[in-house]
Amino acid sequence: MKITRYGEPCPLCCTPLLLDVLQVRSAQSDFPTAERVTGRRCPNCQASRPEQWTEAMQSRYDDA
Ligand SMILES: [Zn+2]
């Protein structure tokens, strides 16, 4: 199951990032057993300064 929630502040504008989170549930339980962040987004920065955004994400997370 995929959810979206707010994460740490954006390195460029300090607005909370939107995180795409993949939740893994076991067959026996309704509770998530693991979480994986699959993406980080800041609509403002991605729209207004995409190159800076890409650089910031790469230097900060290395896997963007
Ligand atoms: Zn931003």
Image (spheres, rainbow, N blue to C red):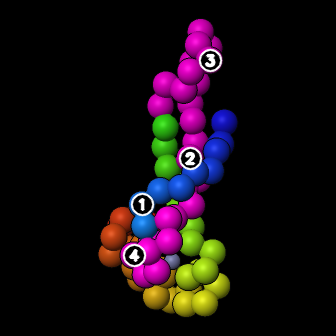
The amino acid type found where label 4 is placed reads Pro
Q: Which residue is mark 1?
A: 8
Q: Residues within 10 Å of mark 2 (few under 14, many from 20)?
A: some
Q: Marks 1 and 4, how far apart in space?
A: 9 Å
Dot 3 amino acid type = Asp
**Is disc 4 placed on a helix, strand or loop?**
loop
Q: Earlier in the sequence, mark 2 or mark 3?
A: 2
Q: Residues within 10 Å of mark 4 (few under 14, many from 20)?
A: some
Q: Assign a secondary structure to mark 2.
A: strand
Place residue 42 in its image quadrant: bottom right
Q: Are marks 1 and 2 in contact (CB under 8 Å)?
A: no
The tag earlier along the polypeptide, 3 or 4, is: 4
Q: CA distance from mark 1 to mark 2?
A: 13 Å
**Mark 1 belongs to which amino acid?**
Glu
Q: Quick check: 26 above or below 48?
A: above
Q: Is mark 4 within 8 Å of ligand 1?
A: yes
Q: Are marks 3 and 4 in contact (CB under 8 Å)?
A: no
Residue 7: x, y in percent? 47, 56
Answer few, some or many: residues within 10 Å of disc 3's Cα (few below 14, many 20 plus, some between 14 and 19). few
Which disc, if any, is residue 11? 4
33 or 17, which lies in front?
Answer: 17
Is 31 in the magenta?
yes
What is the C-alpha distance between the residues marked 3 and 4?
Answer: 34 Å
Magenta residues (range) = 10-34
Q: Residue at x 63, y 75 (%)?
A: 43
Residue 18 shown in magenta = yes
Q: CA distance from mark 4 to mark 2?
A: 19 Å
Q: Does 8 sit left or right of 5 as displayed?
A: left
